[in-house]
Image (cartoon, rainbow, N blue to C red):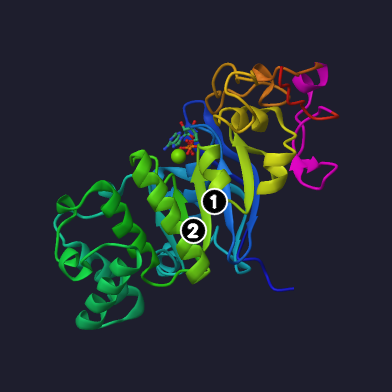
């Protein structure tokens, strides 16, 4: 069997603090097949960015440590690769799109030059070839007058246009995987929808695989083939988008789903608001990490941590509840 595009197994990533080593991602396992979109969903602080930075090995520069686990890209182990080898992978075979396009672009170079630079480094193109390809990429991501826009600086473009430029840059070397960490969070709602539509189109036409990080279940609903729900450093539920939306098992997933207006009936009729907030890393309760906020927690949940186990319909959930939470509509 051919190895998966991306296979993460028991990945533990953390930081050395005055409390000792604290885990921001705790035995995370995820896998992504070619041409698919995997959404990692969870509230802010759940370890999504830390996990994605670990895949790129950029976590090394953020003060983080990969303590355990495997990250296999086409079967090739990334966790112990020297950074000079990672530099050949980053931006070339795996690209990243961050939340804030302005911080991803260099203000003193034209956007065309920035895309061309990536192509010169990774694809050894000469200046003219790289420039022409940069213009083509701007056209591909839907930027009007790409010949003119290529010669402009980031501040001359709107936020949405800049995010298109970042996506063009991420795609320039024809990567097999794009990791997009909250790519639309900094944009206003209409532009958000346009960027999501662009990612869908690129996935369809270029068959690029996407690891999409979002705090927004609505975004996952539109984009995901598979969904992994992350809470306080751990994957608590994982399955196809259909399984997660139709037959959620974990109370946290249900809470996230019910935060989407209109998804589970009239707004206000399905009162299942998740109380409280996410615990800080190094501050986890005993037993299930969700127990302080769970309306169904019972004795065992305070004692033993639930492993991620298969549910009756074949996806995975980490919860001791036997039947799974009910969606109450009265
Ligand atoms: N450089 C760092 N040093 C210490 N803790 C960090 C660092 N970066 C992130 N964290 C902590 O790791 C946890 C997960 O963060 P993050 O992955 O950014 O969450 P998310 O992307 O899901 O919002 C948070 O509690 C955050 O405070
Ligand atoms: Mg984040």
**Side (left or right) of 39 relative to 154:** right
**Side (left or right) of 64 relative to 77:** left
Q: Earlier in the sequence, mark 2 or mark 1?
A: 2
Question: Callout 1 environment at 10 Å: few (<14), some (14 to 19), or many (20+)?
Answer: many
Q: Which residue is mark 2?
A: 200
Q: Tell me the SS state at disc 2.
A: helix
Q: Nearer the viewer, residue 155 or 56?
A: 155
Q: Residue at x 35, y 68 (%)?
A: 140
In the rendered image, the vertical position of residue 299 relative to residue 111, given as above or below: above
Residue 127 in sight in this render: yes
**Side (left or right) of 131 relative to 168:** left
Q: Which mark is residue 21?
A: none
Q: Nearer the viewer, residue 56 or 320?
A: 320
Decide whether residue 317 is among the magenta residues. yes
Q: Position of residue 149 (x, y in %)?
A: 18, 63
- Quarter of the figure with residue 99: top left
Decide whether residue 223 is among the magenta residues. no
Q: Position of residue 265 (x, y in %)?
A: 64, 28
Q: Residue at x 25, y 82 (%)?
A: 129
**Which SS type dominates the magenta stretch?**
loop
Q: Nearer the viewer, residue 326 or 53?
A: 326
Residue range corresponding to the magenta coloring: 299-321
Q: Quadrant of the C terminus?
A: top right
Question: Would you say the residues marked 2 and 1 are in contact, meaning their CB atoms lie under 8 Å apart?
Answer: yes
Question: Callout 2 environment at 10 Å: few (<14), some (14 to 19), or many (20+)?
Answer: some
Q: Which residue is mark 1?
A: 223
- Quarter of the figure with residue 136: bottom left
Residue 99 in sight in this render: no
Q: Residue at x 56, y 40 (%)?
A: 41
Q: Is mark 2 within 8 Å of ligand 2?
A: no
């Amino acid at each position: 069997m051919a190895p998966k595009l991306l296979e993460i197994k028991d990945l533990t990533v953390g930081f050395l603090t005055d409390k000792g080593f604290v885990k921001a991602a705790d035995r995370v396992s995820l896998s992504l097949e070619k041409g698919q979109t995997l959404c990692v969903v969870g509230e802010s602080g759940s370890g999504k960015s830390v996990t994605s930075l670990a895949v790129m090995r950029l976590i090394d520069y953020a003060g983080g440590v990969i303590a355990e686990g495997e990250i296999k890209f086409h079967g090739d182990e990334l966790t112990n690769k020297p950074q000079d080898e990672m530099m050949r992978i980053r931006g070339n075979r795996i690209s990243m799109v961050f939340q804030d396009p302005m911080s991803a672009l260099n203000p003193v170079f034209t956007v065309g030059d920035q895309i061309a630079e990536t192509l010169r480094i990774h694809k050894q193109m000469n200046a003219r070839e790289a420039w022409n390809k940069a213009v083509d990429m701007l056209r591909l991501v839907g930027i009007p007058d790409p010949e003119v826009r290529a010669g402009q600086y980031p501040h001359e473009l709107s936020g949405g246009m800049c995010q298109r430029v970042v996506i063009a840059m991420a795609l320039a070397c024809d990567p097999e995987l794009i990791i997009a960490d909250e790519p639309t969070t900094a944009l206003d709602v209409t532009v958000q929808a346009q960027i999501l539509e662009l990612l869908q189109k690129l996935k369809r036409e270029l068959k690029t695989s996407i690891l999409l990080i979002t705090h927004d279940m609505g975004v996952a609903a539109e984009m995901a083939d598979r969904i992994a729900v992350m809470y306080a450093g751990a994957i608590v539920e994982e399955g196809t988008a259909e399984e997660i939306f139709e037959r959620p098992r974990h109370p946290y997933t249900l809470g996230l789903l019910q935060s989407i207006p209109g998804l589970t009936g009239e707004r206000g009729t399905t009162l299942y608001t998740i109380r409280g907030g996410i615990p800080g890393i190094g501050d986890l309760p005993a037993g299930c990490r969700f127990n302080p906020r769970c309306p169904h927690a019972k004795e065992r949940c305070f004692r033993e941590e639930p492993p991620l186990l298969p549910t009756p319909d074949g996806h995975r959930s980490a919860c001791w509840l036997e039947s799974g939470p009910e969606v109450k509509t009265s």
